[in-house]
Amino acid sequence: MHNAGMSAAPASAAPANVIDQLYQDALGASGGAHYAAPFTRFETLGRTRTGWNHAAAFCTLGWLLYRRLWSQALLYSGLLQGLLLLWFALLRPWLAPAQPIELGLGLALLILVCALPGLWGDALVYQDVRARTLQALAQAPTIARARAQLQQQAPSRRSLFGLAALYLGTVLALLAAALWQTPPAYELADPVPPQAAPVPSTPAPPATPPAPPGAASAAPDTTAPESPATPTEPAPPATTPPRPAEEQAATPPSPLAQGKSKEKPTAKLKDKSTAKAKEPDGAKAREAAKPVPAADNSEPGGPRHYVTVGVFADNANAQKVQKQLQKAKLPVQVQTVGTNKGEQFRVRAGPFGQAQEADKAAQRIRELGLEAVVLRQR
């Protein structure tokens, strides 16, 4: 390999194969076949350029640690953590993007953090190897001592296997955590309606003792007495012949008969008011305690549809989801349910009279980044 930029080095008069050997010693036990062509191109051009490195693209942090690029590894991990912290702590709660938009941004970040190291990985290794080679040639009195120094600093297979085991353990731990994650316990049964508070029973009025047999004549007469001012019509003499039917029909009724006909409705009204007054207070309380049915837009007797969003152990999370649904102008309910894990809070939207309305509401809820399960109840 021809080295165009090595004139100032102590080994400038060394053969080209010696420089190649020094580069191989600096690379270590792996990677010599891959980096030979890029290093030749960089030496010919006198500058670095983009290429493609699979290990740098898909195992960036481990690759940087294996190649002993400590400063680059620290910079990469710091930038990645800063971007994630900025998104989850500030931008995501403020923007509240829909799930497709969030997935698109995550995919773009993944491509960015893989593409940049993959394109410039060969250039980073070349700059590091060339700098260490020049330093070894400047410090060592002989080529053999320079080679020994570079071999001592080069990455070994032991470190490669250790990083591979660390990566494998991390992937298995993440996979186990994802598989052992408990799904939310959705309650499909109808909620138990709240029972009305018991109405205190009122004591029955004391029974009236029966009257003795001889006391019927002594009872006061409740019928209204006839007015003394009402004149009585004298009975006609026996010798008076009966009047014709037409004349009897034309004769107006007597004032006494009119008074009796007026008194009968008054007596009926008094009886009704007395019956209402005797009605016990317990019946009125039971009448007021009857539950009033909630308003529902579903058809009478038809099924009702709900969209279950989730069941939360923390009431604060349930209230947060409720505010999101209210902001989206959806009917929402938060109910307390008992599960095998204790008391939890269920958030669901509805009720909806038609299945199409419930499906549309579920689609809007999923666009908010929440789960939605459509349930049908009768």
Image (tube, helix red, strand yellow):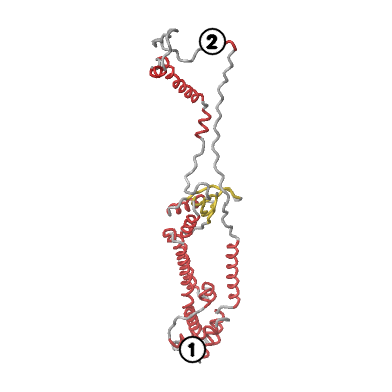
For label 1, the residue is 11
Viewer-proximal residue among 130 and 168: 168
Rendered view: 161 above or below 195: below
Dot 2: element: loop
Q: How many marks?
A: 2
Answer with mark 1 or mark 2, whichever residue precedes in sequence.
1
Q: Position of residue 157 (x, y in %)?
A: 60, 78
Q: Position of residue 287 (x, y in %)?
A: 51, 33
- For disc 2, the neighbor class at 10 Å (few under 14, some 14 to 19, many from 20) is few
Q: Amino acid at mark 1?
A: Ala
For label 2, the residue is 218
Q: Position of residue 267 (x, y in %)?
A: 46, 20
Rendered view: 181 above or below 169: above
For the point 55% across and 30% down, which residue is it?
Answer: 200
What whole-number distance in Å separates the C-alpha atoms at marks 1 and 2? 147 Å
Q: Decide if residue 199 is on the left or right side of residue 95.
A: right
Asked if labels 2 and 1 touch by Cβ distance under 8 angstroms, the answer is no
Viewer-proximal residue among 48 and 248: 248
